[in-house]
């Protein structure tokens, strides 16, 4: 499209259609035939369903095009058309950016490749190069999470900012309500009268009183002089509304307590469902959207009124019962209330909106009500303002400043401290977040080793399932009364057990109403707990399924977060390994070969908790 000033613009919309960004392609200096071809490629690359979904990804593609243009126009012989682009132009771009010391050279080359693949008229030689091998991925620097102490400092700073904002806004709301009710006499206090006039106008219109001013033939609407005397515009609007940095503090606190990705947090909606029905501990279910999940992009987040164990003080008795900022639900309800009027003026249902006197930190330019941007600039600026100390010290023992404040780092920290996935698989949590977080990898490995040792020790200390050999089964069939007496069972129970009528999964149950987990009532425990129940018996016919479950647990060890696997499966795995050790090696191998689809399916259902009573 062409702008009013004649510039050529490529306008890109986010996948949800809420945001847009314009790129000026008129600044490209390459010859016109080549420029037209690559502009068309940029349009195709940023079109709906082309794979890019956010401002961040659009900008990466545009920046790579700008740098590629700068590289080509700096050559002695500049290619005039797409057909003149050669493989060495592509490889030379990468070498040029590396020589400039650009750490993202490979990423720029990848984006340039995506654009060139969509460029009409390129030569077969270049097309072949684009289909070839890309430069190897450089070893990335290990990511470092915040320590628990650092995370608490961040959370405390965010809560302090929001408590101050709440007190300011609620105080001015109450003052305005008294004025409108006629309970205040302002006839003798001109300053109070002006203040209330601003509050009333701000609440009704969403802006301060303004006057028209003609400067050098340009009409502007500037705040009234008596408004400017009250302070900066952002501070005056802040009398009744959260300021941009306070909205950023709310986003930070959501990151601390939920561990969600930056974009779902910053695009959180005010639309929600109260799962608690307004009674008991509050729970609000909010719909989130993570575009990278594609078909599974839409998901629900339950914000509960339960304090996160990491964010509460060391002494919980110091936590005031009315301090709602220690629970995700409390934070959501507070921000929902404090941004209600702002959302009315901004339009839409985004939760995190603010008034901007300029374009910084929010979408669009100029003053007005807008959602907070998702590029993280406002969050980083907030971190610099807080200037929090880290746990590290310099050579003289003075605390160093904390690393830049980023929602991505808060997410890594949350996943590490909670040891559970958030909007991704357990494998992704283990390989992408926990393993790459080198700052605490040694501590993490220590925790995993300790958990493994503890769970295996607990499994070995518990009573073990009673086993019956093939010979014992044969003898019991010949003389069930005598065998039942030796085993302490009723003859009818033994006969039913031998007939397979009492089979559970990994064994047979001799008394389902007097087990250790639900004495006096039907047992509701997981079938994995049969491995240490005194009512369970393992017969030779159960060996194939025991082998399959043992092998499945070993496979899941490679697929799951190590700490999660250790806490959930280390004990049963050790118990099954002990059972298999008691059997003959040949019998175990025969059982593994004899296991068919039925055993495989039943083992998967057991480990997926499909057989549990919930």
Image: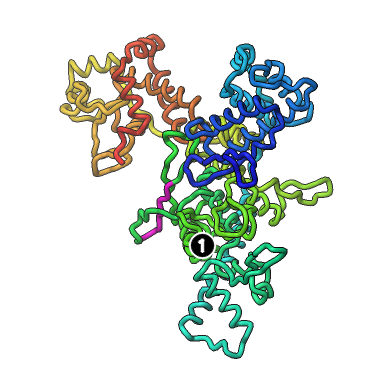
Disc 1 designates what residue?
Answer: 342
Q: Residue at x 23, y 14 (%)?
A: 474
Residue 97 visible, this angle: no
For the residue pair 481 and 157, the one nearer the viewer reads as 157
Horizontally, is 147 left or right of 308 in the view?
Answer: right
Q: Which residue is situated farthest in the front direction here?
A: 217
Magenta highlight on residue 341: no
Magenta highlight on residue 283: yes
Give x and y (percent) for residue 196.
Answer: 56, 78
Horizontally, is 213 left or right of 251 in the view?
Answer: right
Eyeballing the image, is 204 above or below 182? above
Residue 539 visible, this angle: yes
For the residue pair 611 and 26, the one nearer the viewer reads as 26
Q: Residue at x 28, y 18 (%)?
A: 541
Q: Which residue is situated farthest in the left direction here?
A: 492
Horizontally, is 407 left or right of 547 in the view?
Answer: right
Eyeballing the image, is 64 above or below 265? above
Over which residues does the magenta segment extend? 280-287
Q: Residue at x 66, y 77 (%)?
A: 226
Density class for disc 1 (Cα within 10 Å; few <14, some 14-19, many ≥20) is many
Quarter of the rendering occupied by the N terminus: top right
Give x and y (percent) for residue 115.
Answer: 60, 26
| Magenta residues, dominant SS class | strand
Eyeballing the image, is 122 above or below 309? above
Quarter of the rendering occupied by the C terminus: top left
């Amino acid at each position: 499209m062409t702008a009013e000033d004649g510039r050529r613009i490529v306008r890109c919309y986010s996948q949800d259609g809420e945001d847009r960004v314009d790129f000026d392609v008129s600044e490209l200096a390459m010859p016109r035939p080549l420029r037209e071809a690559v502009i068309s490629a940029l349009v195709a690359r940023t079109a709906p369903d082309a794979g890019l979904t956010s401002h961040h990804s659009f900008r990466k593609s545009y920046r790579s095009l700008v740098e590629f243009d700068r590289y080509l126009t700096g050559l002695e012989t500049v290619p005039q058309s797409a057909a003149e682009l050669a493989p060495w132009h592509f490889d030379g771009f990468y070498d040029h950016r590396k020589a400039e010391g650009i750490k993202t050279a490979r990423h720029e080359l990848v984006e340039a490749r995506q654009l060139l693949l969509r460029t009409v008229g390129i030569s077969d030689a270049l097309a072949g190069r684009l289909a070839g091998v890309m430069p190897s991925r450089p070893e990335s620097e290990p990511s470092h999470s915040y320590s628990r102490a650092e995370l608490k400092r961040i959370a405390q700073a965010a809560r302090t900012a929001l408590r101050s904002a709440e007190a300011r806004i609620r105080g001015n709301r109450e003052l305005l309500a008294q004025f409108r009710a006629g309970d205040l006499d302002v006839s003798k206090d001109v300053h109070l009268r002006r203040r209330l006039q601003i509050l009333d106008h701000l609440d009704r219109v969403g802006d301060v009183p303004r006057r028209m001013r003609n400067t050098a033939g340009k009409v502007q609407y500037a705040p009234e002089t008596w408004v400017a005397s009250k302070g900066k515009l952002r501070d005056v609007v802040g009398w009744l509304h959260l300021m941009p940095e306070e909205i950023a503090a709310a986003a930070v606190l959501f990151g601390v307590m939920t561990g969600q990705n930056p974009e779902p947090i910053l695009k959180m909606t005010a639309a929600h469902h109260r799962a608690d029905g307004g009674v008991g501990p509050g729970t609000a279910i909010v719909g989130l959207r993570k575009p990278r999940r594609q078909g599974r992009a839409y998901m629900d987040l339950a914000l509960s009124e339960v304090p996160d164990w990491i964010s509460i003080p060391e002494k919980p008795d110091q936590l005031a019962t009315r301090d709602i900022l220690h629970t995700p639900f409390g934070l959501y309800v507070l921000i929902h209330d404090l941004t209600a009027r702002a959302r009315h003026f901004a339009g839409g249902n985004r939760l995190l909106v603010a008034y901007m006197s300029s374009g910084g930190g929010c979408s669009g330019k100029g003053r007005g009500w807008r959602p907070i941007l998702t590029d993280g600039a406002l969050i980083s600026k907030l971190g610099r303002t807080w200037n929090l100390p880290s746990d590290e010290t310099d050579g003289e023992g003075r605390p160093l400043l904390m690393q830049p404040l980023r929602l991505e780092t808060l997410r890594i920290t949350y996943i590490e401290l909670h040891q559970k996935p958030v909007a991704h698989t357990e494998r992704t949590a283990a390989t992408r977040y926990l393993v790459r977080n080198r700052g605490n990898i040694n501590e993490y490995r220590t925790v995993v080793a300790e958990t493994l040792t503890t769970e295996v020790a607990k499994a070995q200390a518990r009573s073990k399932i009673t086993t019956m050999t093939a010979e014992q089964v044969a003898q019991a069939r010949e003389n069930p009364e005598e065998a039942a007496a030796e085993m302490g069972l009723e003859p009818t129970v033994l006969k039913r057990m031998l007939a397979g009528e009492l089979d559970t999964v990994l064994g047979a149950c001799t008394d389902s109403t007097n087990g250790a987990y639900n004495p006096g009532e039907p047992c509701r425990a997981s079938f994995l707990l049969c491995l240490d129940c005194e009512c369970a018996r393992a017969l030779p016919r159960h060996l194939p399924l025991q082998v399959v479950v043992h092998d499945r647990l070993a496979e899941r060890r490679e697929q799951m977060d190590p700490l999660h696997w250790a806490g959930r499966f280390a004990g049963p795995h050790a118990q099954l390994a002990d059972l298999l050790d008691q059997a003959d090696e040949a019998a175990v191998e025969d059982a593994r070969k004899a296991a068919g689809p039925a055993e495989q399916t039943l083992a998967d259902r057991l480990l997926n908790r499909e057989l549990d009573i919930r």
